[in-house]
Amino acid sequence: MEKNLHILGFAGSLRKESYNRKLLKIAEGLLPEDTTFETFGLIDIPVFNEDVETEGLPSSVAAFRNAIQKADALLIASPEYNSSITGVLKNAIDWASRSYNKQPNPLIHKPVAILGAGGRGGTDRSQYHLRSVLNHLNMYVVNKPEILINMPGRQVFDEQGNLTDEVAVKLIKQLLQNLVDYTLLLNK
């Protein structure tokens, strides 16, 4: 690898025992060599309000934008609420996507991969909507493999939070390798 890459991960769920937050932790352990990983919690990001923005960015939003700017690529773990993206995730993306005080939108041209665990469809609808949003923001979305872990009736995580689905582990590893390869290709 020519350069150590840094990936920023965040989940669209605030729940302590969130399956999607567990997926980020699992992904961190499956990273290709010479790749670092950081997670960012979205809990302190306020609801987007342009009036607040004109008074100055909230510190949590500034920290989120800074973490995105420093990262070479992003990994988003997206749950599915009511057949779409969670409000928490959309809100964070809305804050990050704004140009602010002569600072450009830090999401533009950023490579990003998506994974998710959820209901019967395994977050397929939320990922579809999220891809649409990310493409609109001119981000480079890694499309394959799709990580759509369906939860109902399955024991997908053990008591320690490890993913017990070996096929899913293999696919996550491939998604991460694809994200790294795509990022290196874009940075040539």
Image (spheres, helix red, strand yellow):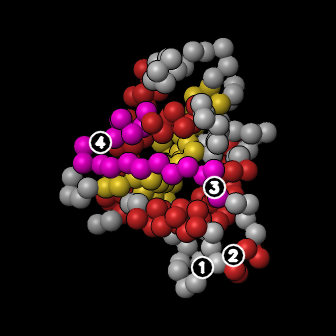
Residue 32 - label = 4
Residue wearing tag 1: 100
Crowding near the residue tagged with mark 3, few <14, some 14–19, many ≥20 C-alpha atoms within 10 Å: few
Whether residue 24 is situated above or below residue 55 in the rendered picture: above
At x 73%, y 74%, the residue is: 52
Q: Position of residue 70 (x, y in %)?
A: 40, 65
Q: Residue at x 64, y 78 (%)?
A: 56
What is the distance, in whole Å, between disc 2 and disc 3 at their CAs?
15 Å
Q: Which residues are magenta?
A: 26-45
**Mark 1 vs mark 4: which is more N-terminal?**
4
Q: Is residue 133 visible?
A: no
Residue at 57% x, 36% y: name it: 20
Say whether disc 2 or disc 1 marks the residue closer to the N-terminus.
2
Q: Nearer the viewer, mark 1 or mark 3?
A: 3
| Mark 2 / mark 3, whichever is N-terminal | 3
Instruction: Return the disc, 1 or 3, that comes first in the chain's sequence.
Output: 3
Gap between marks 4 and 3 measured at Cα: 30 Å
The reply to whether callout 2 and callout 1 are in contact (CB within 8 Å) is yes
Q: Secondary structure at mark 3?
A: loop
Mark 2: give few (<14), some (14-19) or many (20+) Cα within 10 Å: some
Tell us which disc is closer to us: 4 or 2.
2
Q: Nearer the viewer, mark 2 or mark 1?
A: 2
Closer-to-camera residue (10/32): 10
Q: Amino acid at mark 4?
A: Pro
**Residue 111 at what x, y percent from top left?**
45, 58
Q: Report which residue position mark 2 lands on.
A: 53
